[in-house]
Amino acid sequence: MGHCALIANERPDSTYNCHYTHWGGMHLRLKREISHETPFGGDQPNETSQSICAQLLEATTETAIQDALAGRESPSLPVGIDPWATRCTLEEIITEHLEFLHHEAFYVVDSDFAVTAYRTHWFGLQYDCTAVETAPTVGNGALRTVRWYDGEPVGDGFAQGEFHALKAVAGDLIR
């Protein structure tokens, strides 16, 4: 099991490119790792990833996106360089791509590389109540901002536990 997350990188036209990370949701670590020097996370600045990121943010066609990715040996980085979707609004990413059950976190990276981290909370009750058979995982949840102090999330574990407890109570009430 991974700690999956989606990253929305703001483009010059105020739309976003959406990228996936398999381990980036763990401890919301990408909030600290994503920067102009490390646009796809990681510990060390990488000119190749910086160049690819800049080209992807400027690309306006699928051909331009493929050109940015083609012929380059992409380094192993926490965030996948190949975008899941391009030129999307935040609303489109949240309602059409973000799986609230599977993605533990969602990051929004603005044009200045300021990163806002969100926790995802899935509203489905199928694991909390036998009367509920299924629930959509995309577009069926909430995003919660996370408070930070000295580069660390504050109260994140408590808030997650509180949400899971509320779901368990709701499942009991429905049952």
Image (tube, grey):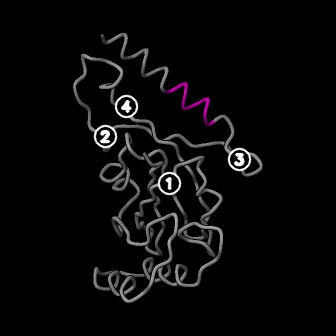
Residue name at image x 30 percent, y 10 percent: 175
Q: Nearer the viewer, mark 1 or mark 3?
A: 1
Q: Judge from the rendering whether residue 116 lies leftward or rightward of residue 1; answer left or right.
A: right
Element marked by disc 1: loop
Give the position of the N terminus as an image quadrant.
top left
Residue under label 2, please give it. Answer: 137
Q: Which residues are magenta?
A: 156-163
Query: Mark 2 or 4 closer to N-term?
Result: 4
The tag earlier along the polypeptide, 2 or 1, is 1
71 lies above or below 88: below
Tell which tag, 2 or 1, sits nearer the viewer. 1
Give the CA distance from mark 1 to mark 4. Answer: 22 Å
Q: Tell me the element at label 2.
A: loop
* Residue 58 image offset from top left, x and y in percent: 43, 81
Q: Residues within 10 Å of mark 3 (few under 14, many from 20)?
A: some
Mark 4 — residue? 123
61, above or below 146, in the image: below
The amino acid pointed to by label 1 is: Trp
Q: Which residue is mark 1?
A: 23
